[in-house]
């Protein structure tokens, strides 16, 4: 019996070690979204305290997104080559250093630079966490544990804004980073102690430096164009230039990867329907999720005239329902395969978005809450099964890359969703005041209807995956 086989049998017979390993990954999955959501919700406070323009403080979000997304594939590949645990633990350490430096930053420039360091660590964490869980747990438990991980992510996202507001109000804006430091230390200690060191799959292969550079720079160019389109103008020279440069570099990446024997990304993975279908569906799902985050507050605040506190109570419905279903959906995928729950989740999401496109200024808020609950149910039912499908479709030697692709799909989808929803909203609203509910509501409705169609397309792509894929 080989060492790998003995480890696999041990995980099945005595799963305690797997669950202790999960503790480190779970806290790591929680701390990143907690940090990000606290910082994002405190941008107005940071703008005031640091006495800078909102456009400048917006680069806190932009630089984080660019660094994290651009480097995830590289860190996933490094995990495949040299072991996922050291890359993951190293990411936690860098994340800790970046967070501590952020709490000490004296100028906006230094704060942006320290957030870039934090994003570097976050990229290594996200690129390897799902691979670690897939290695630690047998196939029949994979959906459930990925559901737990997704629940921790949603919990961090949900707790961040209220916790950040409370801490910043009591102790000042620097305290939002102090909160993250002890949580990261706990994740680091648990990971060092309990995560099993997986055997590297490719020690004799060299890391594809040229491919990593082309991918990172190309993806960054595309994301800058999508992210800054509203501010710079979609037809501006800067947006078109960044988009064109990014696409050219990504094309060069594809050409290079097809020629290498040990590429950064094995493009043959995308020839497999079992892998390509859930990846495409994940992008469409996150397009929808990003659009909801952008459009719903506009409808509640500008279309209905709710206060921020009232809107917050309505908005909490979606993440609550989503969290409650992630574990259930993962367990369901373990029993019947991923295709049915993931496809059903996209169908429910499409229905919820369609219903939200029908609301107007007189729709009872109770109906809006119910509709957001339907959207949350669709997102919760989809997430863990689809992630399990992607991770189960690749060999062990490519799990880090697969996890990185999933994380990249999230960022790319969210960015596309914001851009698409914003473009439809602005087009319908053109020539009218943003403060006039009579025009704001129809513009929001048109955007939701468009996104609903994309969710339906996602259901179709999901339905093309193998029926019993787990």
Image (spheres, rainbow, N blue to C red):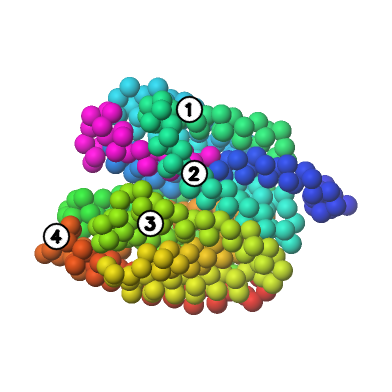
Given this view, does label 1 or label 4 mark the residue nearer the observer?
A: 4
Residue 433, disc: 4
Q: Earlier in the sequence, mark 2 or mark 4?
A: 2
Label pair 2/3, CB-CB below 8 angstroms: no
Q: CA distance from mark 1 to mark 4?
A: 41 Å
**Farthest residue in the left direction?**
431
Residue name at image x 26 percent, y 57 percent: 305
Q: Is residue 203 visible?
A: no
- Residue 144 image-quadrant placement: bottom right
Binning the other alpha carbons within 10 Å of mark 2 as few (below 14), some (14 to 19) or many (20 upward) gives some
Relative height, residue 129 to residue 235 (above, below): above
Dominant secondary structure of the residues highlighted in magenta in the image = helix
Determine whether the residue tagged by mark 1 lies in a helix, strand or loop.
helix
Binning the other alpha carbons within 10 Å of mark 3 as few (below 14), some (14 to 19) or many (20 upward) gives some
The magenta segment:
31-56
Determine whether the residue tagged by mark 4 lies in a helix, strand or loop.
loop
Where is residue 99? Give x, y as percent. 46, 30
Which quarter of the rendering shows the C terminus?
Answer: bottom right
Where is residue 455? Give x, y as percent. 43, 71
Q: Is residue 191 left or right of residue 115?
A: right
Given this view, does label 3 or label 4 mark the residue nearer the observer?
A: 4
Q: Is residue 216 visible?
A: yes
Residue name at image x 48 percent, y 48 percent: 158
Q: CA distance from mark 2 to mark 1?
A: 15 Å
């Amino acid at each position: 019996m080989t060492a790998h086989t003995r480890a696999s049998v041990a995980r099945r017979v005595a799963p305690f070690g797997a669950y202790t390993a999960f503790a480190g990954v779970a806290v790591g999955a929680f701390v990143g979204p907690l940090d990000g959501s606290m910082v994002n919700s405190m941008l107005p406070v940071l703008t005031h305290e640091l006495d800078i323009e909102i456009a400048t403080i917006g680069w806190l979000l932009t630089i984080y997104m660019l660094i994290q997304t651009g480097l995830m594939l590289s860190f996933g590949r490094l995990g495949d080559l040299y072991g996922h645990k050291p890359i993951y633990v190293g990411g936690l350490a860098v994340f800790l250093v970046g967070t501590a430096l952020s709490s000490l930053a004296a100028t906006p420039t230094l704060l942006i630079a320290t957030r870039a360091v934090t994003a570097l660590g976050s990229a290594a964490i996200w690129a390897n966490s799902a691979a670690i869980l897939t290695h630690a747990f047998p196939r029949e438990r994979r959906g459930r544990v990925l559901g737990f991980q997704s629940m921790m992510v949603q919990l961090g996202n949900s707790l961040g804004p209220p916790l950040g507001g409370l801490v910043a109000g009591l102790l000042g804006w620097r305290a939002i980073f102090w909160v993250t430091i002890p949580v990261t230390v706990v994740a680091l200690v648990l990971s060092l102690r309990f995560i099993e060191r997986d055997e590297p799959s490719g020690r004799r292969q060299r890391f594809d430096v040229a491919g990593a550079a082309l991918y990172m720079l190309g993806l960054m160019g595309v994301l800058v164009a999508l992210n800054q389109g509203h501010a710079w103008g979609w037809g501006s020279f800067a947006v078109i230039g960044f988009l064109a440069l990014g696409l050219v570099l990504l094309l060069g990446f594809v050409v290079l990867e097809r020629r290498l024997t040990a590429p950064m990304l094995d493009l043959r993975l995308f020839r497999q329907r079992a892998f390509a279908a859930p990846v495409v569906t994940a992008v469409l799902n996150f397009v929808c999720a990003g659009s909801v985050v952008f459009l719903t507050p506009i409808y509640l605040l500008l279309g209905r005239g709710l206060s921020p506190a009232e809107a917050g109570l309505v908005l909490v419905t979606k993440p609550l329902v989503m969290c409650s279903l992630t574990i259930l959906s993962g367990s369901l995928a373990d029993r019947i395969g991923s295709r049915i729950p993931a496809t059903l989740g996209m169908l429910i999401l499409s229905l919820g978005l369609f219903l939200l496109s029908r609301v107007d200024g007189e729709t009872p808020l109770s109906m809006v809450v119910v509709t957001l609950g339907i959207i949350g149910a669709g997102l919760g039912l989809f997430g863990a099964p689809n992630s399990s499908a992607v991770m189960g479709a690749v060999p062990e030697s490519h799990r880090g890359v697969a996890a990185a692709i999933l994380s990249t799909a999230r960022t790319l989808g969210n960015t596309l969703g914001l851009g698409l929803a914003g473009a439809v909203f602005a087009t319908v609203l053109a020539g009218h005041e943003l403060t006039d509910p009579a025009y704001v509501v129809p513009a929001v409705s048109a955007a939701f209807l468009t996104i609903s169609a994309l969710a339906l397309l996602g259901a179709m792509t999901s339905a093309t995956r193998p029926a019993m894929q787990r």
